[in-house]
Structures are given as structure tokens and as C-alpha cells.
Amino acid sequence: MSYRFDEMLKSLKLKATPKRLAVLALLAAEEGYVSPEDIRCKLQGEFARLGLPTVYRILDELAAGGIITKIIHPNRQLYYYFCGNTEHHHHFICLSCRRVEDLDGCGLHGMDGEIAAKTGGKVLSHILQVNGLCRDCAEEAA
Amino acid sequence: MSYRFDEMLKSLKLKATPKRLAVLALLAAEEGYVSPEDIRCKLQGEFARLGLPTVYRILDELAAGGIITKIIHPNRQLYYYFCGNTEHHHHFICLSCRRVEDLDGCGLHGMDGEIAAKTGGKVLSHILQVNGLCRDCAEEAA
DNA sequence: ATGCTAAAGCGAAATCATTTCTGTTTAAAG
DNA sequence: CTTTAAACAGAAATGATTTCGCTTTAGCAT
């Protein structure tokens, strides 16, 4: 699977700068979720000068545009995950090895509308994330 | 509705100290979710000396015991909510006024098992929370 | 009741991920 | 090629949360 990162950025009205492209490419190449610090480290060879604030800013922009997903972690650090699946769906994340698996057809489709109707309020967003140990890590722990 | 806070603490094998009881009572009296700092402020009259770390510790203990719920907020602060409903359920939270409404029968019952079966992994926890504006706040914003 | 011992509780200070700020650089548009 | 706005770097600040070592309390035997 290959992606047109420049077009993705364009669709978010962000310039396709080398750093943004590199962050996006790195995220897409990773199997699991990564922290801002991870990204800075891995891109240090490519960019002599790359500050953490820049990484944070880029990740924010990408997450705001919806092309990467913010992972909520018990350790309260930020993590991000790139997922080619553009359908509405959620994730099963491994707390040990950081692997992410898609949960398709999660049964929440239409929930927002139902809830809005029931409570009379307005649904702005919802969080659904399943935390656990992936098959390999679960077996290892056993 | 009145609760036996001392018994609740006992069931978690925590001593029913005045501060724990006060935190629990305060949470139960609040309609919405509150921050550790809120709690410290509101209990300042009752306890001349009450440090934030103590509040955090108590909230942790109560949340670990499952009698209060941790709220995940976009502003990255911790909030907690006391909910008398002991059935497995989730919440609709208002980002404006902090009101919380229960979502019963959320359609996730059994999901953990299904996911475990499908991925081969082990589900440790899941997060489901719906963020929005309650009826009043939505009307006000309109 | 009193003394003893281990657990629980406490707040000052430290921590550390994240953000802000300011000045600089870079790139798109005319 | 100039103009103008967006991106960027890095130092420093921020502020929620945790650590640490001391103090208090409760449980229990005497």
C-alpha cells in the first residue's frame, strides 16, 4: 500500500513541507503507535535540526485533519497512529508492543444520532478505544 | 438518594478517613465531573490542610476501586465523576457545563469477548465516552 | 488502658510532557 | 524578483501529576 502524502496534506490545506511529509511517511511505515519523542529521534538523521515543538505542531495538524489518530494511553503520554482505513472505525491497541488493530463494524454507527435524540444534546465527538494485549504479547505474558 | 460512603470505602479495603469520606461525599453531591483542583478548593473550609497530592491519591484509589469514573477531557486535565449506577455503562459528557448523563445499554456488552476472540488478544480495558453539549448548552449556543 | 509496630497519610518539592513565545527562515504568489 | 504569509527552531515557561521522606494513625498484644 502506498499513499500520496503530498495530496493528503494538500487536502488539509497544509503545505507539503519536507518535515510534514517525513512525519507522515514515518507514521505510515510504523505498525504501531508512536510518541512525538520517537518521531524526533527517528528523523534526527534526516533533519539535523528538528525541534520537539515542531513535531507536536505537525502531529496536531495531522490529527486535526483526521488523517492520523490520537491514542489515549494510561501513561498519559500522547501517541499517534496512521491508519489508511478511511471508514469510521476504532482501534484495539496493545499496551505492551504498541501494535494497533482495526475494529471494523464496531456497532456504534448511528449511535451519535440516537444519543442526541435521547438526551436532547449535541454530540461533538466520541472516544472508543480498546486497550489490551495483542495475541503475541498475551501469549508471552502467559 | 443517599449512600453509605463508609461501607463503600470498606469494600475497597480503604479506611474511612475524614478526607476520603469528604471527597466521596463531594463527588456524589456534584451533578457533573470535577477536577482535583476543584475538590481541593471546595474542601478548603473543611480541612485547613489538604494537599493536592492527597486529593490525587484519594481519587486514584476510588477510581481503581471502580466507584468513581475518570473522565477523559480534550484539555488533558483529569476529571472524575461519581455515578451510583453500578451496571456497566458509559457516559455522555457536556464539554461546556460538565454535566454527565448515563448511556444505558450502550451496545458494547460482550464486545470485549468478541474482540478477544477476533484478534486473539486480551482485552484489559476499554474507553467509551461521548463528548458534546447537553440540551441546555446546545440551545444556548444556537 | 498503654505501649509497640506496621501501614496509611501527608505536603514540599521535583518531574517532565507539552506549550508558549520570539525571532528567523522558507516558500508560494504576483 | 519582491512581497507576504506561513513554517520553523529553540529557549524558556507552564502546570498537571508524582515522588519522597517524614508524621500520624490504627491494630494488636500486653
Image: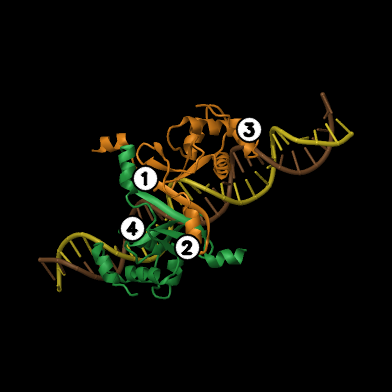
Chain colours: A green, B orange, C brown, D yellow
The span from disc 1 to disc 3 (Cα, nearest Å) is 34 Å
**Which mark is first along the chain, 3 or 2?**
3
The span from disc 1 to disc 4 (Cα, nearest Å) is 17 Å
Label 4 or label 2, whichever lies nearer to me, is 2
Task: Determine the secondary structure under disc 2.
Answer: helix
Label 1 or label 4, whichever lies nearer to me, is 4
**In this rendering, does residue B63 appear at all?**
yes
**How many C-alpha atoms fall within 10 Å of the one at disc 2: few (<14), some, or many (≥20)?**
few
Quadrant where the N terminus of chain A is found in the figure: bottom left
Q: Which mark is residue A81?
A: none
Q: Report the residue marked by disc 4.
A: A88
* Up/down of B92 relative to C18, above or below: above
Toward which corner of the image does residue A129 lie, by quadrant?
bottom left
The span from disc 2 to disc 1 (Cα, nearest Å) is 28 Å
Have a look at marks 1 and 3 and say if they share a chain: yes
Q: Report the residue marked by disc 1.
A: B131
Position of B104 with respect to D3 (left or right) is right
Identified by mark 2, the residue type is Lys
> Residue A22 location, x and y as percent?
35, 71
